[in-house]
Image (cartoon, rainbow, N blue to C red):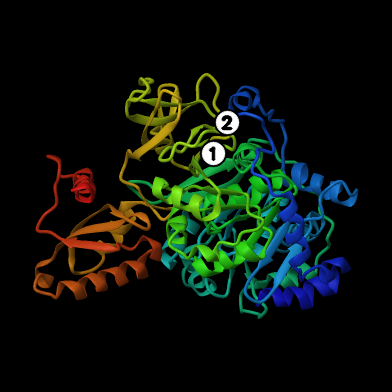
Amino acid sequence: MHLIAYRKGLLNGCCLNKICTNTIFRRGPWLQMWRSNKTSAPKNFKNYENTRQTHNPQVPLHFNFAKDVLEQWETKEKDGQKSSLPALWWVNDEEEVRWSFEELGFHSRRLANVLCQVCGLERGDRVFLILPRVPEWWLVNVACLRSGTVLIPGTSQLTARDIRHRLQVSGAKCVITDETVAPLLESVASDCPTITSKLLVSHRARHGWGNLTQLMGAVSDEHVCVDTRSEEPMTIFFTSGTTGSPKMTQHSHCSYGIGLTVNGRYWLDLTERDVFWNTSDTGWAKSAWSSVFASWIQGACVFIHQMPRFDISTVLRTLSSFPITTFCTAPTAYRMLVHEDKSRFQFQALEHCLCAGEPLNPEVMWKWKELTGLNIYEGYGQTETVLIAGTFKGMKIKPGSFGKASPAYDVQVVDDDGVILPQGQEGNLAIRVKPHRPFSLFTEYTGEPERTAECFRGDFYLTGDRGLMDDEEYLWFVGRADDVILSAGYRIGPFEVENALIEHPAVAESAVVSSPDPIRGEVVKAFVVLTADFKSRDRKELIQELQIHVKSVTAPYKYPRKIEFVDDLPKTVSGKIRRVELRKKEWERKTS
């Protein structure tokens, strides 16, 4: 609905006329063009080894992605030196919106003026953003870059408690959201005194909130981009760990703005003639990775379908109807898609498929190849990094392996002291940080120097994952070194789920671990010790009650899909729960 307001208000009232005339897009001619240009050969490099040896990006003293990348594409567009593809192409079931780089710049400059002039934000102030896949999410990203404010994205699935914690520890001064999340923010606002401004993406007014569309229509479209230093803070993502609350993972203007070149140019293999669709939720770092920096570094078109949730029919219809050349989604999505009827896979433009977020089953890769004729190129990375390793075009694919080290890093398998292990031996997947720390590594866990220091051993940063390297330097994922659960691309810390469970009167104690699942790879399982008053309750009813309770207390994607009631939990001599023992038991069931 807010896009209708954009059309009738902001777009028609105060900006370039051509924005209005280009909004609705007809697909036919574009598909015909892609049918004749489809290719699977690498576009940006000839071979992996040569790329690794020559990749050496220089980091200037000052860098700002909005000025040094987006404005450069804007200039090329005006000079006729760029393809006519839009920078942003958004669709839902009713309409389409397309913005060129020039139009993206126009709107983001207005929004930057709203942040600075209306909200009174200064360079370094933090902006908390919760929006679904709507064009305004991308505008806020660019406006924060332009204004030098630090963006903190969050998923729309966060609960009031999640939001309160993030606002309190981050000290954010501005919040931006829509009508769905606004009541949650209002319910915790009194506990978050640093908030000085609230912006709402809506076609209606709401008391106490500034309407984003109206405010953008009342400010100038002239804005000088802040001259940020390369190492200056740019964004913060909250990421779950084994213990404690989610950590604030801070990145600089160069770590993502320049560092993600390796993703866009080499792994995604994008050019300005590509239409790229990444299905990640806007609350996760993968959305910034692929739907902002990596794609626009290459001048590619970012395609978005506003699906409230992943829907197979919508994905198949979209891939068949739009000229999407490059597609990236989670392995869970591929596992769902390969069960569909082959006649539905009419992807006349698609030429490059990728996945990340969790390991991909070899059988899913083979089935996708059979259905589409295309390989799936796996990638591996973290919120704290850019692409750590991947399978690149032109490289032999080893099903089950996520490829070789990214040109951005020296990746090794090391022991717990940071000593490199022989090929074929399991250890910690690690990135060399000495004598030179890669600029594309996160800056710190903000405000938590001890948790930051725990990630480093000897000359290496430990990813927290276990793996091995074979004799051809391919890397293989073994599992998490800690208890973090990777389910359908989501990273879930057991501590958060256990905290939610213990609030229910039925739970005396709990332990949360991963459990194998044929679709999601792994899911959250809770082992629960009941309090005396609930031991006689119907177990099926109690499972449903606990699941509903967790969904109400923390983000719904974290709820335990499996619950097992036990008399006691395995513990160490000092009383710590041995999750590793429970996790091992779960995964042994899969093979028995």
Check if mark 2's residue and mark 1's residue have beta carbons within 8 Å: yes
Q: Amino acid at mark 2?
A: Ala
Against 483, residue 6 (above or below) is below
Amino acid carrying mark 1 in the image = Leu
Q: Which mark is residue 408?
A: 2
586 relative position to 285: left or right: left
Depth check, front residue: 78 or 40: 40
Question: Which residue is at a point 52% across and 71% down the rendered structure image?
Answer: 181
Q: CA distance from mark 2 to mark 1?
A: 8 Å
Q: In the rendered view of the protein, which quadrant contains the N terminus?
A: bottom right
Q: Residue at x 68, y 30 (%)?
A: 59
The image quadrant that residue 412 belongs to is top left
Is residue 104 or residue 50 the one in the foreground?
Answer: 50
Q: Residue at x 57, y 42 (%)?
A: 251
Instruction: Rate crowding at label 2 as few (under 14), some (14 to 19) or many (20 or more) other CA atoms within 10 Å.
Output: many
Density class for disc 1 (Cα within 10 Å; few <14, some 14-19, many ≥20) is many
Q: Position of residue 378 (x, y in %)?
A: 50, 43
How many numbered marks appear?
A: 2
Q: Does 261 sit above or below residue 171? A: above
- Residue 201: image x %, image y %? 64, 71
Q: Secondary structure at mark 1?
A: strand
Please name the residue that numbered disc 1 is placed on. Answer: 387
Position of residue 381 measured from the top left corner of the image (x, y, whole percent): 49, 41
